[in-house]
Image (cartoon, rainbow, N blue to C red):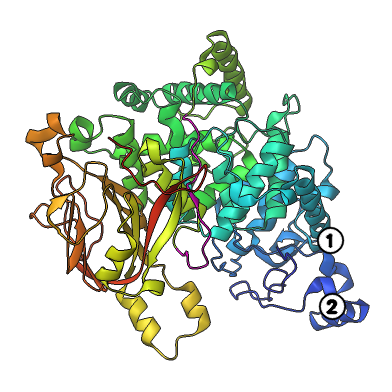
Amino acid sequence: MDRFNTDTLCICSDSHTSPCTPTKNLLEMDDEDINTFNNDNNMEDNNYSSPMDMYLLSHDALCGAPTDQTITPGWSSRPSKQTGFFSHGRKNLSSELYLQILKQGVPPALRCAVWTTNVSKGDQEDQDDEEDDDIGTLRKVRIVEHGWKIAQQQVNLDQIDEDDLQIPDLGLGPRHLVNLLVKDHGDCIPEAGAASLKRVLYVVQQLLIVEYCPMLPDLTALLLSVMDESLTYHTLRHIIESSSRDNKNATTKRYVAVSPLQHIAWCATFLDLMKKLYPQTHAVMVEINCMTPVSLDPIFKRFFVTILPRDYVKRIMDLYTHHGVETLFRFGSALLCLFHAHMNEEQRTHTITDPTSFWEGIRDYARTADLESFLKMVYPAYTGGRYSLLGRSNSHFPRWTTVQRWMKDNETWAERQDLHKSFVEEEQERPLGFVEHEEVVFVRNPSIRLLLTHWFPTPLKATKLDLVFSTNIHGRTVERFYHHVAKVVYSLTVLEVLEKETAEEENASDTTTATKKNKKKNTLLGMFASQTWHPKGDKGYGSGECFLFRLRPNPICFHYQPPQENQENSNDSSAADQIMRSGKEFISMGIAQDGSSGLRLNEDFTKGTTSPLVGGGRLYDEQVFEVGLVEVYRLVREVDGKPICHEVLQ
């Protein structure tokens, strides 16, 4: 990846409310260029900052989204090693005052430099202030980039086929990892972003000897959303090393749990904290069985990404990089208390009955919650004593040294009870393979294939997808479709929904390249068939292994649900005789509430229809829609590449 580009290495304009303006690549400046730059920007001797001491601006290496370059008041429009991040030369601030400024939110353009610097200062075992201030500057970027190249060479990443690499989940579990890749970070992570995520996590796992750290995949994704792979690895190395030490140095912060034992101890300490600060909320958690490490996954595995809006999560990250895991305890305890206070009678008595519904309720509450008020409750104004949560004198958050002692005691208790040995994680799944064709479009993204693996029947997980039909190659007729799938038993059909605005943009002659690049991605729907499609199936065929799915946005899978009276005999073929229906003018799958099909395509694959399914839910909001590209894949054996020509799910 070319780290040195003018989009990233630019200097901000003087105005606090103006976006940053690109300049010449600073790494290519000679002495004359630097003198001209200094004169043009009126750099006096008393506030001079060398261009090489300027901090890097943020850029999204995960999804490629544009970064808001607005610099809000109070933050420097020319942040550098000499002047710091703040206007009026405020560089050396007390930890408490710095925390209050972070609470207002870091400008997106400065998050790369602020996050890396915060973590570096948090890991003070072998760092000095001078070296901390160098992190994130142009002067340091070449060293960081070189270190990243050396790290990749040490694990022989250049000699490994990256397509064969699995994304390490580090204890996160395949279900959470799939959701991370396809929906939890805004949308399905693009192929390039997923590849960056895989490389960084693989090097961290192999070189830093990290076997268990379930929070790391989400932290890596968040870091990649504001910086490149090299700085992400550099920051994660500090996070891991700081968290792995014995922590006798009080200034060294813990960020992540690096063993199942630590994870259990942190969860137990959080529950102890809830019981002390908010006993009524704790009583509700006991009642709905939200007292296990698994029930606290949204906080201690997923870093709030599944329950809070993404902007909120990044605001928490602003504070987390400075304050460490204490941030999770503060935000988590206050969030649960606030939600409990806002629960209505229906939720208290009927809706909130288990951990899943509890977190779903919190997710709905967070959509309308006032983040600024929430931040004031979590980190109120510092008055020289302890912080007080929610302004209640009887709810003082304990000193962090006290919480650390609880964590140590709980770790000893968990080890004595051998709880970490029974803390078994889900078996790791890996993405389906695919046979390389230049024409393949939809399944190139490994996150898509990992999602399909999660939905596929167990006997078919060790298979590859082989393209047999594409409307880009074979045309838009159902006859050609039947011809190419005539010998295919198990098939996967993926189709693109053409949104109305997409069709208008494609027809518009003045649509710019940038507009096309940033336009919303089309919805992807699909069908998994367990029998061969044929034109004489208007009476229905198929089996209960068929399913409908949506890959983008908000991935979801709809498996066959037999009628209520047939629940006990769900394997009876008569119970699924309408799963697949087809003829000379259509193909369709699924049973809708009105007796039609859940998904139906017309004879030339240009129109599609959906209807609410019997089991509830719907693939697409519109009943009728236009269809773009359609691809159909057969399943072949991973071992020898031979097609699966007979049913194996009997």
Q: Is residue 195 visible?
A: yes
**Which percent across, then down, holds residue 359?**
35, 38
Residue at horizontal 75 percent and vertical 61 percent from the top: 89
- As for residue 86 lying within the magenta part, the answer is no
Residue 87 quadrant: bottom right
Residue at horizontal 50 percent and vertical 29 percent from the top: 396
For marks 2 and 1, give the one nearer the viewer.
1
Which residue is under mark 1?
Answer: 139
Q: Main secondary structure of the magenta part?
A: loop
Residue type indicated by callout 2: Asn
- Sequence order check, earlier mark of 2 and 1: 2
Marks 2 and 1: CB-CB under 8 Å? no
Over which residues does the magenta segment extend? 426-441
User: What separation in Å lies between label 2 and label 1 (alpha carbons)?
Assistant: 17 Å
Q: How many neighbours does mark 1 have within 10 angstroms: few (below 14), some (14-19), or many (20 or more)?
A: some
Above-or-below relation of 174 to 114: above
Q: Is residue 349 left or right of residue 487?
A: left
Residue type indicated by callout 1: Arg
- As for residue 432 lying within the magenta part, the answer is yes
Q: Secondary structure at mark 2?
A: helix
